[in-house]
Amino acid sequence: MNYVIIGNGGAGVRAAETIRNRDREGKITIIDRESHRCYYRMMLPDYISGWKSRDSIYVVPEDFYEKNGIDFMSSIVVQEVNPDKRQVLLQDGKVLDYDRLLIASGARPRILNIPGIGSSGVVTLRTLDQAEEIIALGSQAKEGVVLGGGLLGVELARAFNEMGLKTRYLIRENRFWPQMLDKVGSSIVERKLEEKGIEILKEEVIEEIEENQGKVKGVITSQGRYLEAQLVGLAVGIVLNIEFLEGSGISTDSGILVNQRLESNLEGIYAAGDVAQAYDLVHGEHRVNTSWMNAQRQGTIAGINMSGGEEILEGSIPFNLINIYGIPVVCMGLDLPSGEGYEVLTGDYPRGNLYKKYVLKDDLLVGATLIGDIREARILEKMIINKASLGSHKNRLFEDDFDLEEAARELLG
């Protein structure tokens, strides 16, 4: 069997490991546009900050590919997929045949179309090479500006601040991460950022980047403010790497539409990770859920099925995890419900930097937020996926002696 995997991230590498454990003889090829072995993208801000060494961010050792008989084709861009011929065409003109194909090509940062965007000192953070660029530029900078009100935006702001830059953090909305956090959750994070010296400017974006001899010297904001900066970080969303599928016949929407086996509409072609648009249990529709944990789970399931197994993804839910200056934050499922029929329970929280919120519908747990103490996160996720009814426990959820794990065993068997 000839397996080709496009993408060397969490989904692609996990799929390759799974395939090799099940098929000792099959040929496995991983193609990736980057030159590095698989690494943890979510650790890049910690690497920039100096909290993590470069060696510690790698997922696999240097000899991983050789030991597992994997042909790793690095620094290669895929041009086209031809399902009729079962071939992958590379940008350098080479052609690879496949029996089973996994598309785990990930995403790249969205780029704004504003004056000065091409100046040296304007950075995004998605790859290890970009992290190295930020470290190099940051060593010559004194002031930084970050735009982006979500996970990567706050991580960039923290990294800039830890590099010793005077950091201003611009958020388009009226609070931090309103797509996943309520006002209480946002305020806890904002307070911690401000305690660390990061200035937060809300409902403000970058209109123009000013440069001098090709290098950033400042930004003009939508409020008419001029902010001096030698480093400008942009975290305004992502673009899925699926353009090369145009004309292939593979069904796409936001991402690649897949069934419970993570197989596309074409036999033998699978998708996993950021590009896979799988069934979302709490929203009741196919959605793209971008998280490391989701990518690895999907990689495992895709690998099993590609190598002749029968494994299904019961469904995924949004699951976001971040640690902001020692305050862990988890948001999962429908933690910001809209419409009627939802019950939001917070008990006597917040308690300082601790916050706990459950979202129920017809007594079924459909979403949760944990800040400060996330030990119950995996249990809550399992309960959401398995549609656990918390009706009989609602009045005890926030009691100090309530054992959620015991309740889960009772409810889920």
Image (cartoon, grey):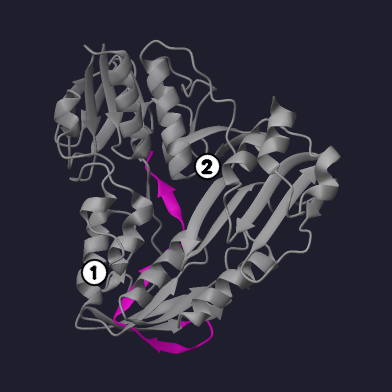
Label located before the other in sequence (2 or 1): 1
Tell whether 145 sits left or right of 283.
Answer: left
273 over 124 or under it: above or below: above
Tell whether 266 sits left or right of 191.
Answer: left
The span picked out in magenta is: 221-242
User: At which x and y percent is residue 362?
Assistant: 84, 39
27 over 162 or under it: above or below: above
User: At which x and y percent is residue 411?
Assistant: 74, 30
Tell whether 366 sits left or right of 70.
Answer: right
Residue at (56% x, 70% y) in the render:
189
Q: Residue 135 got which mark?
A: 1
Residue corresponding to mark 2: 289
> Crowding near pointer 1: few (<14 within 10 Å), some, many (20+)?
some
User: At which x and y percent is residue 206?
Assistant: 45, 76
Q: Secondary structure at mark 1?
A: helix
Q: Is residue 236 magenta?
A: yes
Q: In this view of the protein, can residue 342 be seen by the observer?
A: no
2 over 333 or under it: above or below: above
User: At which x and y percent is residue 27?
Assistant: 21, 17
Q: Give the position of the C terminus as an image quadrant.
A: top right
Residue kind at label 2, given as amino acid type: Asn
Residue kind at label 1, given as amino acid type: Ile
In this view, the residue in front, 394 or 324, is 394
In this view, the residue in front, 97 or 181, is 181
> Crowding near pointer 2: few (<14 within 10 Å), some, many (20+)?
many
Q: In this view of the protein, can residue 408 be seen by the observer?
A: yes
In this view, the residue in front, 11 or 325, is 325
